[in-house]
Image: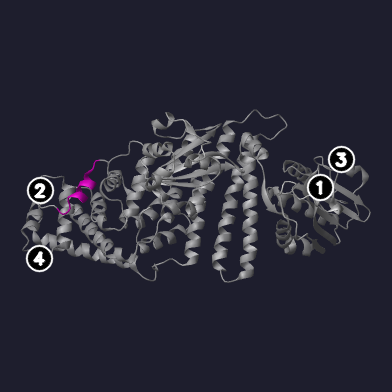
Amino acid sequence: MPEVHPGVLARLVSTLGQDGLSGQALAAHAGFDAPLALAIFRCAHDGQQNLPAGLQLADGISRLGVDFVRTLVLAAHPRPAEGQAAWENGIRVASLARRIAAHTQVCDEEQAWLAGLAHNLAEYAGFAPGDRLDEWLLAADPGGFVADAVRFCRASPARIRAAHPLVRVVQLAASLTYSTHVNGNVGVRASLGGLGLDAAEAERLQKEADYLAQEAIHRYSSREIAPAAPDGLTQAYAVLVRAAALQDFLGSAADLESLSRRAALAARALFDAPVVLLRVEGSLLVPPSWWPAPAGLSALALPADFVQSALSRAASGATVFWQRAQADQFPVIDAQVARLLGAETLLCEPLSAGETPWAVLLAANVCEDAAELPAWKEFLRALSGRLAVLQGAAAEPPAAADAVSRHEVRKAVHEASNPLTIIRNYVNLLSAKFAEDQDTQRDLAIIGSEIERVAGILQGLGAKREAAAAEAAAPGIPVDVNQVISELVRMSLDTLFLPNKINVQIDLDPAMGSVVTRRDQLKQVLLNLAKNAVEAMPRGGKLKFATARGELGGQSCAVIAVQDSGPGLPEAVREQLFRPAVSTKGGEHAGLGLYISHNLVKAMGGAIECDSGPNGTTFRIYLPMADMGKNPAAQSGGQRK
């Protein structure tokens, strides 16, 4: 995404915060910056077929949708200060070209404005050079006359004598703007005569244009409006709006084909990069029929299990960056894919439902740092979520008469994801607002962590059955049990324990080590047990978390005990404790939460048991240690045979 003028960007961000935002409101500001205006035209051209010639900026915004343009705007970065002169000259030439076109009526004045604005884009640092600039200009005007006007704006009057009027208007505007002696300039007089103008008319038009240009330059350059570098709150607000816009733009795709088009547009707008999706099918990476890709990709047997390949490493779950300068370090197959995509670099990003990647997204011609950009992470999050919903809906089997269909579940998941995104981004906004308050930062970090955990649960609900099965079969990773318990107690102290008069005690073995599990699932199990314990002690009581080494089936394991001082479980409840919908609620802690916890512990390769009596209830969780049983010195007090 090209850099735009900071004043234009500040005005746009301010406009985005208003209610009733319209395409005209955005166009009123975007039209004063050539890179941003051309980016909108280019994306409109990519996203629509058979666009009419002379497409107006407001029409382009209307066709793309305000949400998409909002995403594009907030991906922009303020141009360095040294670009000020080029931007001001663009405004001056554009203003004069529009006035000449309106006065002579020989060409469209909006096209004259755009061509004048873009006439010196070659002077903008980092803007698309050569044939790529022509591509952007042709998107603004498929007839090619805007591109011609930019290309020949410095040509002599003799060369453009019979050219399209738009070319002659922009050339005259540039000559009048840059010439110091208009009356004595033979070339300028020839250009005036070719358009039926005399010197007096030219002087009047130039004064009018100068006034309009100066007013625009002042409006968008005011220091009160646009600091050189937006402050933390402005940046946080931009992130918030961009993420919500991405979620809405991709989330409104009705089918996979529509999603692929929207994803391509978003990637072009945010990163100026084409993207291609490859599905993991057994040992191969295969382009799906609903995602456009070069035909040659289907002719290649792309391996999903070739450890040296950047694509294959992404299929195994790693983000990998490939670049042509280091192509000799990768297999030839990667270079062939890059050639088919016209890419000097490839960012290979795994897409997963849970922990198991099911696809690889390739982004061409991005920088190595792109994977760390907040915009990229927001894009992946929104794309993955919508893909999970749409693919699940496509594979939906008929639902039983008394069951909620998986399609309805995924619909609910999608609807819940939108407010969750808003919550996530307001947390980021508060974090920026209270950057100096360490206590607040700690609390917000906990909230953010829990938001991501909920998001993971929602994404798991909306994923395909195959992805869920693969996740259940996937091995866990080493997790520090003591750390998880400490985080849980800290997180719940002010919100769960203290308000309910619960005295919490922790007795953690410092030499505990790690267990092979999934961190979020373990935290969910412990939180379920803690909430049930609190419900069992309505007048307050004691809750203890303890860890020790033990043994499970001859293998070294961690034993996690959660003990309360409640009245204990009735015998009838204990007999069917881990079945669904068994609950006392008025007397003890059982029900759906224990059923879920039992299944989660079982999926982690462990076991859970319960001891209950008049003086309280203790749940013990047994999970495999990360040392895979190599520590035979299990503590006898925690052994389980």
Query: Relative to residue 337, is residue 476 drawn left or right?
Result: right
Dot 1 corresponds to which residue? Answer: 551
Amino acid at pointer 3: Gln
Residue neighbourhood size for the residue with mark 1, other residues' Cα within 10 Å, grouped as few (<14), some (14–19), many (≥20): many
Dot 2 corresponds to which residue? Answer: 159
Dot 4 corresponds to which residue? Answer: 181
Q: Is disc 1 placed on a helix, strand or loop?
A: strand
Q: Position of residue 578 (x, y in %)?
A: 82, 42
Q: CA distance from mark 3 to mark 2?
A: 92 Å
Q: Is disc 2 placed on a helix, strand or loop?
A: loop
Using the rendered image of the protein, determine whether residue 255 is visible from the camera's viewpoint.
no
Q: CA distance from mark 1 to mark 4?
A: 94 Å
Amino acid at pointer 2: Arg
Q: CA distance from mark 2 to mark 1?
A: 90 Å
User: Can you tell which of label 4 and label 3 is closer to the viewer?
Assistant: 3
Q: Position of residue 211 (x, y in %)?
A: 23, 66
Query: Relative to residue 103, is residue 404 drawn left or right?
Result: right
Q: Residue at x 70, y 47 (%)?
A: 516
Using the rendered image of the protein, determine whether residue 25 is visible from the camera's viewpoint.
yes
Colour pattern of the rendering? one colour
Of marks 4 and 3, which one's residue comes earlier in the chain? 4
Of marks 1 and 4, which one's residue comes earlier in the chain? 4
User: Can you tell which of label 3 and label 2 is closer to the viewer?
Assistant: 3
Dot 3 corresponds to which residue? Answer: 576
Of marks 2 and 1, which one's residue comes earlier in the chain? 2
Residue neighbourhood size for the residue with mark 3, other residues' Cα within 10 Å, grouped as few (<14), some (14–19), many (≥20): some
Residue range (magenta): 143-154
Q: Position of residue 595 (x, y in %)?
A: 78, 43
Does the magenta run of residues contain 358?
A: no
